[in-house]
Image (cartoon, rainbow, N blue to C red):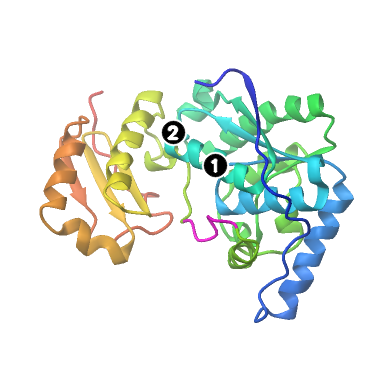
Amino acid sequence: MFPACTTVIAMTADRPGLAAPPAAADEGLVERLSRLESILAGMGTVLVAYSGGVDSAYLLLAAHRVLGDGAVGVLAVSPSLPAAEREAAMRVAGEIGARLEIVDAFEHMNPDYVVNNPNRCYFCKTELFDVAAPVAERLGLASIAYGANRDDLGDFRPGMVAARERGIRAPLLEADLSKSDIRALAREAGLSIWDKPAFACLASRIPHGTPVTPERLARVEAAETVLRDSGFRQFRVRDFGRKARVEVAPEDVGRLLAEPLRRDVERRLMALGFMTVEMDPEGYRPGKLHGARVEADPS
């Protein structure tokens, strides 16, 4: 576990200014990029809630290029963040050249989070912003921002409520940038993870109503490490207590189901304590866990 607050200074060669959108981009994207630059410039200084995903990474990159040392990232570390994701996030911050603060978060100690109701993310984001606020104050940064974008408006996002309650800015959303816009801009800017698959926190693998505990999160992390080590880029291991359900990208299902890989994955997951392992023949899609039936689990 990291100490309560650790500072990482990550510097690379100067790359001033935001890269222009691809030549084939529509005029609307050019306008949205210009709007983002204006928003960031108007903020003066900002602490970016950074996870290492494409959205927050591009926001940190954009803020760093517009504001220089006036833009700092903050990465919250807790049992819901896999070690591999933490290390990747630190590496990408190094590519960007931005200063990164690493803090511990303790949402897993909040009973409202642990009970795992559909509004769980509200309590997670509340903890994130609450541990970020002292960092912004210590560094003299005027505001805190996070990576919400236009596409998030169409989903159930309790975390956005927590952001609004605390006055957290969403520059990508304010600039009306979509997920596809952000990926295109990130690619043009040379961000190495521009095409990284979306990766929700580990708690999203546990069905609502099943308590989120560090032990369950650690088992999910270990199970997903098996898939990562097997060469899959997009995956989920859903924890149903006695049963694990493995989901990979639809185009990778055939490889997952082929022997001997299937048998090896099944064996390694059962070694983690799962009694049965189900390989989802349809593959991963967002929100698939919602409404899933939870099997009785004596533990």
On the image, numbered disc 2 is attached to which residue?
83
Amino acid carrying mark 2 in the image: Ala
On the image, numbered disc 1 is attached to which residue?
91
Residue shown at 31% from the left, 64% from the top = 250
Q: How far apart are marks 2 and 1 (CA)?
A: 12 Å
Q: Nearer the viewer, residue 279 or 234?
A: 234
x, y percent for residue 32: 76, 68
Amino acid carrying mark 1 in the image: Arg
Give the prevailing secondary structure in the magenta stretch.
Answer: loop
Q: Is residue 120 shown left or right of residue 24?
A: left
Residue shown at 36% from the left, 29% from the top = 218
> Between tags 2 and 1, which lies in front?
1
x, y percent for residue 82: 43, 35
Residue shown at 29% from the left, 38% from the top = 223
Q: What range is drawn magenta here?
A: 191-196
Q: Is residue 233 shown left or right of residue 244?
A: right
